Image: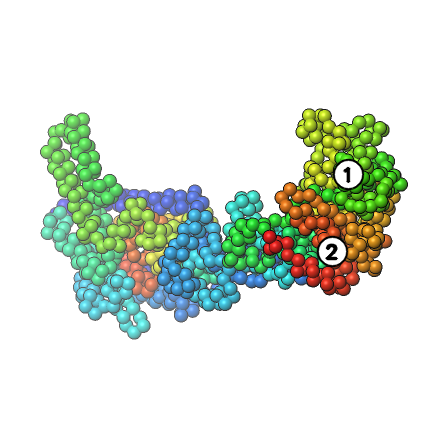
Amino acid sequence: MYKKNYSSRKYVIISIFVIVALLFLIKLYFLQISDNNYGNSANNLVLRTITEYPQRGKIYDRNGKLIVYNDAVYDLMVIPRQVTNIDTAEFCSLLGIDTAFFKKQMKKAIHYSRYKPSVFIKQLSKEEYARIEDKMYKFKGFFVQRRALRKYNIPIAGHLLGSVGEVNHRDLKRDSYYTRGDYIGKSGIERFYEKQLRGTKGSKIIQVDVHNRNKGSYQNGKYDTLAVSGKNITLSIDTELQAYGEKLMQNKTGSIVVIEPKTGEILAMISSPTFDLNLLVGRQRSKNYNALLHDTLKPLINRAVSGTYPPGSTFKMINALVALQERAITPKTKFSCQGPESKPIRCTHHHITPLDLNEAIKQSCNPYFWNTFKSIMNKPSFGGTHNAYEKWYNDIRSFGFGQKFNTDIPFEVKGNIPSKAYFDKVYRGSWNALTVRSLAIGQGEILITPIQLANLAAVIANKGYYFPPHFLKNTDGSDSLMNKFKTKINTAVKPKYFNVVQHAMREVFSKQHGTAHYYEVDTLQQCGKTGTVQNPHGEDHSLFIAFAPMDDPRIAIAVIVENGGFGSRWAAPIASLMIEKYLSGEVKRKRLEKRIMEGDLIHKH
Amino acid sequence: MRKRDNIIANTDWFTVFLYLILVTAGWFTIYSASFDNPDASMFDITQRFGKQAMWIGLALLLAFTIMIIDAKFFSAFAFWIYLFVMLVLIGVLLFGKTVAGSKSWFQIGSFAIQPAEFAKFATALALARYLGKLNININELKTKLRAIAIIMLPSVLILLQNDTGSALVYFSFILVLYREGFSGIFIVLGLVMGTLFVLTLLFGKLYLIAGLAIITVLGIWLSRKLRKNAKTVVGIFILASLFVFSVHYAFEEVLQPHQRNRIKVLLGMMHDPRGVGYNVNQSKIAIGSGGLTGKGFKQGMLTRYHFVPEQSTDFIFCTMGEEGGFIGSSLLVLTFMILLIRLVLLAERQRSVFSRIYGYGVASVLFFHFMVNIGMTIGLMPVVGIPLPFFSYGGSSLWAFTILLFIFIKQDANRLNVL
């Protein structure tokens, strides 16, 4: 029987083996060498980056009293991509939410990112966290992130401390440090010192198994970084004085700014009405924030730095100082006053005439300061009103008016000192001292902020210089922040010219006919000046600036009570009580204190 | 002693060496894929790697036993062995234990054995014995049908156990039949049918038939040779069209849903990396993340944290891909390729037809496992649950492959005694 030999078919069979092996090698080459995505996919499956949040820096007052600290809460986070096969019903009942809420939150998270964590439920309490902690492993893609919420020891100084809230879209875009659900200082000190307070986030890479259980750190923590706590900050604020000021200002609109003249440190800054920062913490934050935002009294506005007012009579002293410096008058110069008949500005007080500078400050005599202003504007050596005005303008600005201090004061505005160019434009070049006469008595286009006014008090207390007002007393470690606050700024007016102004301001308290004589306290050596500012919208604003004690000033203050009438009625007693509180530690004038605290200018209409 | 009686001298130690390499590498890979405690002993028999060590020890004992048994035993008792194993396969259908949907295990105490694994060498023996008869004429239809029946019987029995993967292995004997003189048409036909099957699923039957019609018409029009045989060409077209029509039916009605889905995933008709495509997707990520050099022994994160299912059994190749990288995995592929080629060369040097056919049977079975198992882990084959020979965890498969291979090594060592 013939049998055909098929042994050459071994080559076909061997070829099949070789072809399959080669196909495998080619496919392996593509999988393992030319395509790098698999490495990332593997990392996505196994590695989880856990952000370690640093402790936000605490805030202390100048006496080391703790004002702001942290309390732990827990955010339930979700990474949508990792959510697989979870029992939604069990999940919802565990957390006490309904499926509609579940779907809404998932949609939101997916909209933000499938790969990055989003907050699913904000701020669970310790108790809520304890309840779900053990069962979290069942729900792949969800984890709990510990966060710190701000806590306030004393509900004061809302405006200047500012609140902390979740980052918004703009923050995320501006600074890649933040991820969704992070907290950021929204206003005030919290915002200004955000970088110092927030610290540095750390990250830990861990490995998880297919059931999302933690299997320990990746490569022994080679790529991990530790969180660095935020720096603690000590503010110049005196919490007792701040709290006292807020009490005095309750039911009034306006502000108090208190500065330590020798350093420029702000001892207290009150804007009334104020708000309790505790309202802006936690899950109710946005609801409360909206309520505050739409309150007709605008409690969120920090009137101390964003409110602008004409300075009124308090401005007269600057005019006097500039006139002295520019030798337009001397302390002995006398002008006559025709009382209410005076032209072009009438006098609102009754006093002897003619009167000198000392008397004029004490009596706040409008005609005297009109004449003073005119003397500057018309001084022959300046060569014309316009040049004189320029000179005056620069001297005024050297007191800090018409510009920001640019320290750590949040939401500060410039106010306004009208420039020569402005008048040239408005009056088409044809104007003189008479045209702008309102400036003589601090009315007209001039607008100042309460903090600028307080700084004026500090300048007078210091006889001619100031340190830019600021809040920071010190931070842990770095001093570089402080340097710019330590620059002494001299005004254009020489110290010797301040003597007469100080003396007159002292007599505002000490002399029988001084406008604040009623609030004189022997031991305090208060010096002050009232202001009553015309207000087209209603009753005059009550203004007062003061410093004390005269020999060695430790406190400078400005008070503005909107629609408070005469300066001597509300602003002066408030300033005087603040001075007493700060210098004596205790207020003895209980009746006065009671009258002020109970005074209600808001609800009387 | 005559040279031809010297077993040690006549044993093909190169094949034994490749076997030992694969078994040892497999053991280490299983260790890496299943250890929980990094300090665990390789011989801790409470763990898979420890058990595998035990299976390997017993496998070597089996191999040694086979080497000292008279070579003629296997050809003499081939049919009896086949018959016995077929009875066991029927027995397992009646008394077996169901694991993961397949009724294919015998449970003896805490010890489970899978008879289907042993049917492979039995079938190879029976086929070799039948076609190795001196007076057989392979060209007779009766012979062909009998040979096919020997192959199909265990396949059908295993299919009844619902172990489709193991049943498919018997298709590999086509290579043996081809070598022994069956027409190559079977292989070509298989390839054409496979291609038509895939194209039908991808493009739909109507487009495909339209395409085939255009090719037929163009062929007849342009080629004189085809025009002469127009009837045949049209006939082939009609058969192909009928096949295409039947594909749809077969796909929807014959295949089980999970099998359909695995094919759809493979062909990219379905994207479901968390459901049906999960295994393959995770497997590709694990292999792909290995890069050129791999992450190192015991360093595969996906392997360690169980991201790849079945990673010490059917998906063991992933661990090699992740930890050994391109270098490790391609060395493994090449080792298998060299072993397969070596087996073909050994088969061809046999004087006895029985030994040659058996040798081809061994190579074909190993090749099928190699192709399907590695192919599925890298996404070139649908997921079919069959082990990687010598490598995957499991006593039954390791012993069965060891027996399969060493019977042939014994035959080869004895080749000089065959007249």
The image shows residue A511, relative to residue B47, as above or below, that is: above
Does residue A185 show up?
no
> What residue is pinned by disc 1?
A341
Indicate left or right for A227 with B152 as reference.
Answer: right
Q: Foreground residue, A26 or A565? A: A565
Which one is earlier in the sequence, the residue at label 1 or at label 2?
Answer: 1
Left or right placement of residue A130 versus residue B340 in this view: right
The chain letter under disc 2 is: A
Residue A367, how many percent across, how many down? 79, 39
Q: How is the image coloured?
A: rainbow
3D distance between C-alphas at marks 1 and 2: 31 Å
Q: Residue at x 13, y 54 (%)?
A: B146
Could you tell me how many numbered marks the image carries?
Answer: 2
- Residue A70 x/y as whole percent: 60, 61
Residue in the foreground of this view, choosing between B265 and B144: B265
Q: Position of residue B279 (x, y in %)?
A: 35, 54
Identity, as a three-letter code, of the amino acid under mark 1: Glu
Which mark is in front, 1 or 2? 1
Q: Determine whether B238 is above or below A109 in the image.
A: above
Residue on which disc 2 sits = A573
Q: Secondary structure at mark 2?
A: helix
Amino acid identity at mark 2: Pro
Mark 1: secondary structure: helix
Looking at the rendered structure, whether the residues under marks 1 and 2 are on a common chain is answered as: yes
